[in-house]
Image (cartoon, rainbow, N blue to C red):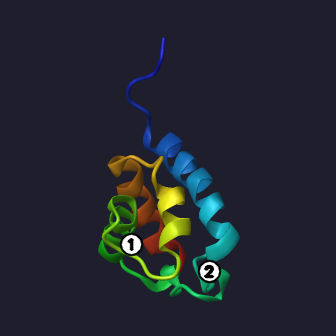
Amino acid sequence: MDKVIANEDEIDERIKGLYVKCAGCHGKNGELHALGKSQKIGFWDEKKIEDSLLGYKNGTYGGDMKGIMKGQVMQLSETDIKALSKYISKIGK
């Protein structure tokens, strides 16, 4: 039987696991300009990150990296995006 409600530690570990894909371009703490083009997301607040990820997903946000990022966020649920945004906003501080 699948577990419907995960505890907070399990969610945190899963979100850290999701960020591993992001870290390849953005850096461990969001300190890098991804592929030399993006802003450093580790300095962004939670809302800016969430709005950006949702915008990449629905096609309303993005410049040079739009095509790459859309592919990265399409599999994320809104719940994942909210949790990932919260996580990213804390790691660069």
- What secondary structure is marked by label 2? helix
Single out the residue that lies furthest toward the top.
1
Depth check: 74 or 9 in front?
74
Within 10 Å of disc 2 (Cα), the crowding (few <14, some 14-19, many 20+) is some
Residue 6: quarter of image? top left
Depth check: 45 or 50 in front?
50
Residue at image coords 53%, 57%: 71
Res. 34 mark? 2
Residue at image coords 51%, 80%: 42
Q: Answer left or right for 20 relative to 55.
A: right
Which residue type carries mark 1? Ile
- What secondary structure is marked by label 1? helix
Instruction: Name the residue tied to disc 1.
Output: 49
* Front label number (1 vs 2): 2
Q: Is residue 23 above or below residue 80?
A: below
Alpha carbon of mark 1 to alpha carbon of mark 2: how far? 14 Å
Whichever of callouts 1 and 2 sits on the residue coming sooner in the sequence is: 2
Which residue type carries mark 2? Ala
Within 10 Å of disc 1 (Cα), the crowding (few <14, some 14-19, many 20+) is many
